[in-house]
Image: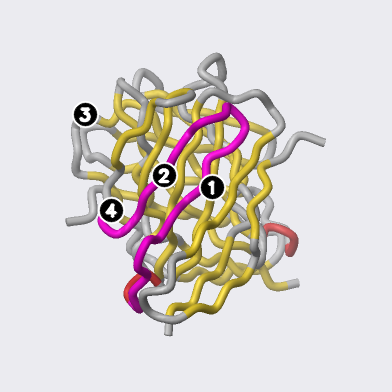
Amino acid sequence: EAQVTQNPRYLITVTGKKLTVTCSQNMNHEYMSWYRQDPGLGLRQIYYSMNVEVTDKGDVPEGYKVSRKEKRNFPLILESPSPNQTSLYFCASRSHRAAKNIQYFGAGTRLSVL
Amino acid sequence: DQQVKQNSPSLSVQEGRISILNCDYTNSMFDYFLWYKKYPAEGPTFLISISSIKDKNEDGRFTVFLNKSAKHLSLHIVPSQPGDSAVYFCAASTVAGNMLTFGGGTRLMVKP
C-alpha cells in the first residue's frame, strides 16, 4: 500500500530535550516536506526537499532541522524544543512527474512540549 | 500576513443540500489551487484542483470555481452527504510549485 508513515504519532516532551520525528514514504517520491498545523492558521510549511541531499526552508523553519540522506526518509529534528513548537505535524511527499503539487500526507504527529 | 484565507471556520448543511466553501488569496503569483479534505486523526487528502487558466473544474459531486479578478475560489459539494463532514483546506501554489500555502480550514458538518 502506498503511504507516508510518521513516527511517533503522539509525543510529550520537555523543553530543551532533543527529539526526532521520522517520516518514510514507499512511493519513490523525489519531493518531501514537513508542515505544522495550528488552529486558525492551517498548515504551514517548515522545510521541504526536492531530492536526496537537497533541502530548503519553508515559511516557518526556525527551531527545526531536517536531513535527506535517503530518498524514502525525511526526519524532522527539534534540537531544543520549546512550548511554542507544540503542534500537529505532517509529513508529505509527491512525485516530480505528478500533477502540480498534489502532495500525499502522513497521518500526523501530535507533539506537546511542556 | 496570511496569503490564503478561509473566512468561515465552520459551516453546517443539511444532507442533500449544496455546501459552498470559500477561499480568498492575495498573492497574484499563485497559479494552481487545490482543496484538501481532512478527517480527525488522519492526514489531509487531495480532493480537487484547478489551474489559473480555467475558471471551473468538476469531479463528480465536487466543483471548484476560480475567479481570478476577485482572487477568490469556492468549492461546491452537491449533494452533500454526512460522510463529507470534515475540515476542508484550500491551498495555493506558484509556478515554481515548490511550496504549498494553506488557508486556515473550514469545518463542514453535514446533518442527516
Left or right of residue A94: residue B16 = right
Name the mark nearer the viewer: 2 or 3.
Answer: 2
Q: Which residue position holds label 4?
A: A60
For the residues labelled 3 and 4, say whether their Cβ atoms are less than 8 Å apart: no
Q: Circle 2 sits in a helix, a strand or a loop, which is it?
A: strand
Q: Residue drawn at (42%, 26%), measured in percent from left and top? A: A53
Q: How far is the residue under mark 2 from the one under mark 3? A: 28 Å
Numbered disc 2: what chain?
A
Q: Nearer the viewer, residue B7 or B102?
A: B102
Q: What residue type is labelled 4?
A: Val
Q: What stretch is highlighted in magenta?
A: A62-83
Q: Which of B104 and A112 is in front in this view?
A: A112
Q: Where in the figure is residue A100, as x and y percent of width and height? A: 47, 23
Residue A66 is marked as 2
| A82 in the magenta segment | yes
Name the mark nearer the viewer: 3 or 4.
Answer: 4
Position of A46 relative to B100 (above/below) = below
Q: Circle 1 sits in a helix, a strand or a loop, which is it?
A: strand
Q: Which residue position holds label 3?
A: B29
Position of A16 relative to A2 (above/below) = below
Q: Circle 3 sits in a helix, a strand or a loop, which is it?
A: loop
Tag 1 or tag 2, which sits nearer the N-term? Answer: 2
Do badges 4 and 1 share one subunit?
yes
Q: Which residue position holds label 1?
A: A91
Total marks shown come to 4
Do badges 2 and 3 share one subunit?
no
Q: Residue drawn at (51%, 71%), measured in percent from left and top? A: A111
Which part of the image, by quadrant, shows the N terminus of chain A? top right
Q: How far is the residue under mark 2 from the one under mark 1? A: 12 Å
The local crowd at label 2, few if under 14, some if 14 to 19, many if 20 or more residues have their Cα within 10 Å, is many
Q: Which of B99 and B81 is in front in this view?
A: B99
Name which quarter of the figure residue A71 lies in. Answer: top right
